[in-house]
Image (spheres, grey):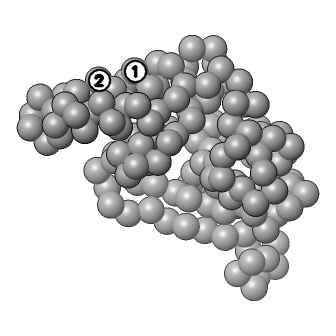
């Protein structure tokens, strides 16, 4: 899922920083996206110049601290509430106070994730459908308190 999100945003013209807790995984993800883009070019769906431009916008990061300047963070990690809350707490310390923190979860409560943050108002659900770069639909979910519901 994360690789598809990286590809989607890079193809849309955004600079993307990809980070993973597993050493080398972010670089593998960037390489995977590059191969997928080259296959699209081989099929005539993209030009080689477009592939180069998209690929140049993808930056594999070795540490979470390398996303410090990001305005939007889209998390696509394991579906474990405790792990997600811990990550969002770390992100609040790293990215600007104005950054949007989005979870790609489809099974966990966005309100529960937001509730673990000092600033829950900046948390949203951004659920993509697979394959991300093909499906032209995403579901945006706010925490229940933002929607006028109880947590």
Q: Quadrant of residue 56?
A: top left
Read off the residue under disc 1: 31
Q: Residue at x 83, y 48 (%)?
A: 92
In the figure, is residue 118 to the left or right of 97?
right
Q: Quadrant of residue 121?
A: bottom right
The answer to whether any part of residue 26 appears in the image is: yes
The x, y position of residue 145, in whole percent, is 79, 76
Q: Badge 1: few (under 14), some or many (20 or more) residues near its Cα, within 10 Å?
A: some
Read off the residue under disc 2: 35
Residue 13 position (above or below residue 111)? above
The x, y position of residue 82, in whole percent, is 80, 42
- Element class at badge 2: helix
Q: Quadrant of residue 87?
A: top right
In the figure, is residue 63 to the left or right of 16?
right
* The C terminus, quarter of image: bottom right
The answer to whether any part of residue 40 appears in the image is: no
Disc 1 from disc 2: Cα separation: 6 Å
Count of number-bearing discs: 2
The x, y position of residue 96, in whole percent, is 78, 51
């Amino acid at each position: 899922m994360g690789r598809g999100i990286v590809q989607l945003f890079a193809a849309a013209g955004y600079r993307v920083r990809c980070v993973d807790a597993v050493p080398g995984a972010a670089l593998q993800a960037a390489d995977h996206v590059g191969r997928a883009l080259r296959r699209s070019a081989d099929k005539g769906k993209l030009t080689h110049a477009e592939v180069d431009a998209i690929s140049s916008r993808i930056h594999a990061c070795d540490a979470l601290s390398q996303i410090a300047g990001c305005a939007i963070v889209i998390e696509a990690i394991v579906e474990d509430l405790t792990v997600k809350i811990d990550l969002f707490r770390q992100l609040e310390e790293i990215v600007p106070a104005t950054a949007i923190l989005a979870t790609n979860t489809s099974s966990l409560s966005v309100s529960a994730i937001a509730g673990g943050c000092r600033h829950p108002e900046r948390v949203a659900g951004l659920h993509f459908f697979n394959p991300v770069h093909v499906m032209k639909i995403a579901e945006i979910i706010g925490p229940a308190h933002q929607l006028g519901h109880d947590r």
